[in-house]
Image (spheres, rainbow, N blue to C red):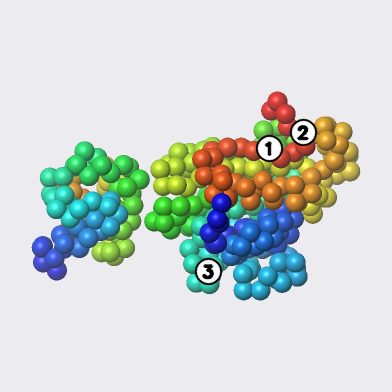
Amino acid sequence: MDDAKTFEQFKECAVKVLGVSPDKVVMEANFAEDLEADSLDIVELVMELEDSFSIKVEESELENVNTVGAAYELVKGKLA
Amino acid sequence: MEHKSRVVLITGGATGIGAATAKALLLAGHQVAVTYHTRNAGDELTSFGNQFYQTHCELTDPTSIDSAISEVEAIFGPVEILIANAGATDDTLLLRMSEAAWAKTLDTNLTGAFRLTKRVLPQMIRQRWGRIVFVSSVIAGMGAPGQANYAASKAGLTGFARSLAREVASRNITVNIVAPGAVETAMTQDLTEKRQTEMLASIPMGRVAKPDDISGAISFLTSDEANYITGVVLPIDGGLSMGF
């Protein structure tokens, strides 16, 4: 899967779970500050990403994942 | 207030408090599934036809929980109201209590509630609505000789429920506990005669509860009228536990 397609799929998950407009889901967006996501939103997003990409994310991997870019890199790393 | 029909799962719902609650919620128009361990539900519930479903479930086995809930989801849809009612006792004084008797009781009553909740919670979160009621006991607060394992398991539910209540309150999911006192069920009939006499003497209302005395409160906590109540431990005990 190419990068743009993967990000599009990632973005769909974020829009669905966080209820934000697609244009807000950019690499530098901070979950808490820019997307108003609380900790439960982030867990929900991870669960959605796990289902959508058929991956498994461990709790410990979520430390310091505060931005869309960091979360996307985490997902991409699982697909490699 | 207009009530929506909801999907309800009650563990230990074939007898006692669980069956009384199942009946109350069926009469309220909900679709009710119950799990049973040893005895399945009688005509009083099965007469509700397609509105009612029952299946066997072993609370100490996550696979059994998963398959029971999958069955319910396939028939009724995602569980919106969970009533974790099933419980077990294995009474003896601590000096005689085996580690197995301790662990099994904790596994059924406390970890069983954890397993059930984990299984149904993602769907409740997705739907932004849910009701969870744990059936505890006055023993959780008062303690009782011979019931250290049971009391610990039920007291553990309070910390579990209140933590969860804080985690999911923003998603319109409430988590509450009812704490019945002595109730006329098979489980309390197993208590020794001495223990039953002691209990009766200490109940201000002078009688044990009927399952219907408990099911009314559980039904209320699952209703729309209770939408601002979460993290509560509600004693239903004829005054038995006042002050504890």
Front position in the image: B94 or B161: B161
Front position in the image: B109 or A37: A37
Give the spatial CA distance, label 3 vs label 1: 31 Å
Q: Earlier in the sequence, mark 3 or mark 1?
A: 3
Name the amino acid, label 1: Pro
* Residue displayed at 44% across by 42% down: B169
Q: Residues within 10 Å of mark 2 (few under 14, many from 20)?
A: many
Q: Secondary structure at mark 3?
A: helix
Numbered badge on residue B76: 3
Name the amino acid, label 2: Leu
Give the spatial CA distance, label 1 vs label 2: 9 Å
The residue beneath circle 1 is B235
Mark 1 in CB contact with mark 2 (< 8 angstroms): yes
Tell me: B190 left or right of A37.
Answer: right
Where is residue B204? Give x, y as percent: 82, 32
Q: Say whether residue A46 is visible.
A: no
Using the image, name the chain to which the residue with label 1 belongs.
B
Q: Earlier in the sequence, mark 3 or mark 2?
A: 3
Name the amino acid, label 3: Phe
Where is residue B39? Give x, y as percent: 73, 65
The residue beneath circle 2 is B240
* Residue displayed at 31% across by 63% down: A51
